[in-house]
Amino acid sequence: MDGPRIPDQLVLAAAFRAAVFLVAVFAATAFLVRLALSPLDDLQRVAERVSRGEQYVRATKSAIADPRIERLGTTLNQLLDAVQADHLHMHQSIRRSLAVREAERATVAHQLREATAQQLSALSFQLSAADRGFGTAGGLRALRESREIAARTIDDVRRRADSVYP
């Protein structure tokens, strides 16, 4: 024997203390790793909610996040803000486009009603004149003018209809 023998109880007690220490270190390490990665969990939750259609959700700032993870959250928020701004701009453009189109349609409808009604009234007068002067030079002239008014009216209606829906 080289030296005094250590009692088995002391060896078991030291082994137990070492095991408890290792378990405590492992638990503390697992807790710290989980705590350090929790900002990534938040980013994942934000991404999942955005993919489900929640437009206004944003990543929150974390006091414990690594600066690189914090930059990732900031970049994600900037991206979501830009997408939201583009979405708003697109809706405003659509509304303006629809308003312009509706105004154009109202203008064309008004022109069709007024111009066509006026031309058809003139045609009606010319046809009445042709009817009264049937077989005379004045009646023939009224019929020719009626044909010209009808042709102009048809062309005008076609032109205006094409401007609404070419």
Image (spheres, grey):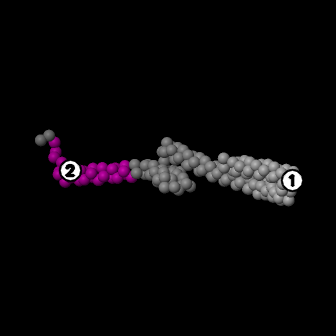
Q: Residue furthest left?
A: 1
- What type of secondary structure mainly makes up the magenta span? helix
Residue 110 at least partly seen: no
Front tag of 2 and 1: 1
Q: Is residue 84 left or right of residue 116?
A: left
**Left or right: 79 in relation to 132:** left
Q: Which mark is residue 73?
A: none
Relative depth, front residue between 106 and 99: 106
Q: Residue at x 83, y 56 (%)?
A: 134
On the rendered image, what quadrant is the N terminus found in?
Answer: top left
- Tell me which amino acid carries mark 1: Thr
CB atoms of marks 2 and 1 within 8 Å: no
- Residue 149 or 57: which is nearer the viewer? 149
Q: Secondary structure at mark 2?
A: helix
Q: Is residue 148 visible?
A: yes
- Cα–Cα gap, marks 2 and 1: 139 Å
Which segment did they paint magenta? 3-31
- Residue 17 highlighted magenta (yes or no): yes
Residue at coordinates 81% horizontally, 57% vertically from top-left? 127
Rendered location of residue 95, percent (x, y):
66, 53
**Residue beneath disc 1:** 136
Count of numbered labels shown in the rendering: 2
Residue 17 on image: x %, y %: 27, 52
Left or right placement of residue 163 versus residue 85 in this view: right
Task: Identify which amino acid the numbered label 2 is placed on.
Answer: Val
Q: Secondary structure at mark 1?
A: loop
| Mark sitting earlier along the chain (2/1) | 2
Where's residue 49, x and y in %? Answer: 49, 55
The residue tagged 2 is: 11
Residue at the extreme front of the image, as rendered: 135
